[in-house]
Amino acid sequence: MRISTRTVLLSSVAVLALAITGCTAPNSGNEGGQKAASSGDVPDKPKAAVTLNILDVAGAQKEVGDMVADFVKKHSDIISSVNWESGGAPDLVGTIKPQVDSGDLQVDLVFTGNDGLSAGIGQKLWVPLIKDYGDRLSNQKNYIEPAANMQKLADGFGAVVSYYPSGPLLQYNPDAVTDVPKNPQELLAWAKAHPGKFGYARPANSGPGRTFIMGLPYMLGDSDPKDPTNGWDKTWAYLKELGQYVSNYPTGTGQVISNMADGTWSMIPTTTGWDINPRAEGTEPKTIKAAAFDKFTWVTDAHYAVVPKGQSAEKMSAILNLLQYMLTPKVNAMAYDTGYFYPGPAIKGATLDKAPQKSQDVVKEFGRDWYDALIEKMPKETPLTPDQMVKAFDIWDRTVGVGKFESK
């Protein structure tokens, strides 16, 4: 069982809206008229154990859920129970902003990717966690270098809790693909020779999709891989040509996995986690293979913890204790999970031998023996900054995917 306390999974916007407009939840941030915390009045521990209401808009519960449950089990004097909600990153601002504006927090802690982090920064929704409480999160000094680089993107408002090099990689059905492409040009030639058998999801809705388009500028030699508007001429031309042989772009990675599983598609761009986890969970055949381009740059990714403004001193204390605990090697090693964010840990020393036996078994059976060496060998770059990512999504929607995806 992933979480030992009560778990609430709210996947639809309508249900989330009911939570926003309903009565104040038990132990919400302003219960009993508690004032919002300031950096000087947060105690080392709360006076009494609190309940935390956590919203996950990145699928991060897969890696961090067991870390949270472990803390609750061992520190029930700090956190008595946890309620989990899930939602989509595009709906995050609409969920949190009314709570911050009204001073009535229903959500105490959010786990998000770079997209939700940025959207909240733009709307001034997050506590400046590192600026105000960085001394309480001293384990951040132990970030591995690429995780530390992802932390810089948070601009002080979030804390990296898990990390992975992501991709782009290729996944393929060996029964249908015998000439595995080694570079983008060979991939284009394969797609042309096998129309409708290669595809990927709309980047705005898919980690592997956005990793694929962000990785192409490095492989194609574009003028500025960090500027999709002025520096991706080769990438946009390539994606438009490739798109001639893509029948449709699903609005989620789950459908991509289904297309591979049922044979609709024979090859897709992927990431380390999206290669391992579906095979481990049985949503893809074990026989599916993966390959790397000969020359490529890893586009890294991370999950962040952010706290909505207006949080009480008691709950802020509990959150800081929790995050500090999550950033210790033995606990952070739980991020290996079932390979969803492989490797997953963001902290030095959080090695696979410290991970739960189940995680070790999954990596042994479903991991690739060449992954770790490739992660060390190939260069790594952070993804586009949030504002540039939004621009890239817009250009893709208007010029590449237009007419072939369901706009939401």
Image (tube, grey):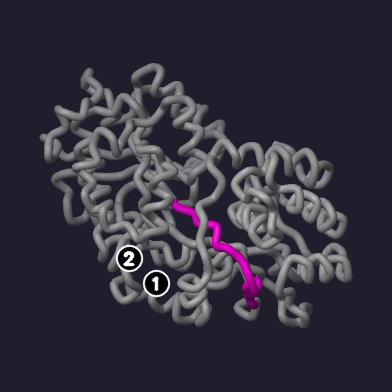
Tell me: residue 265, above or below residue 128: below
**Residue 20: x, y in percent?**
45, 26
- Mark 1 residue element: helix
The disc, 1 or 2, on the residue closer to the chain's N-terminal end is 2
Which residues, given as a range, are shown in magenta?
289-302
> Measuring 52% from the left and 74% from the top, which residue is drawn there?
374
Pointers 1 and 2 in contact (C-beta within 8 Å): yes
The kind of residue on which mark 1 rests is Ser
Residue at 35% of width from left, 45% of height from top? 159
Q: Nearer the viewer, residue 298 or 35?
A: 298
User: Position of 137 compared to 407: left or right?
Assistant: left
Q: Of the numbered discs in the image, which one, if any, rests on residue 267?
A: none
**Mark number, residue 359:** 1
Q: Which residue carries the number 2 mark?
A: 333
Indicate whether 98 appears above or below 160. Answer: above
Residue found 37% across the figure and 36% down from its top: 157
The picture places residue 38, in percent across and down from the top left corner, at 21, 26
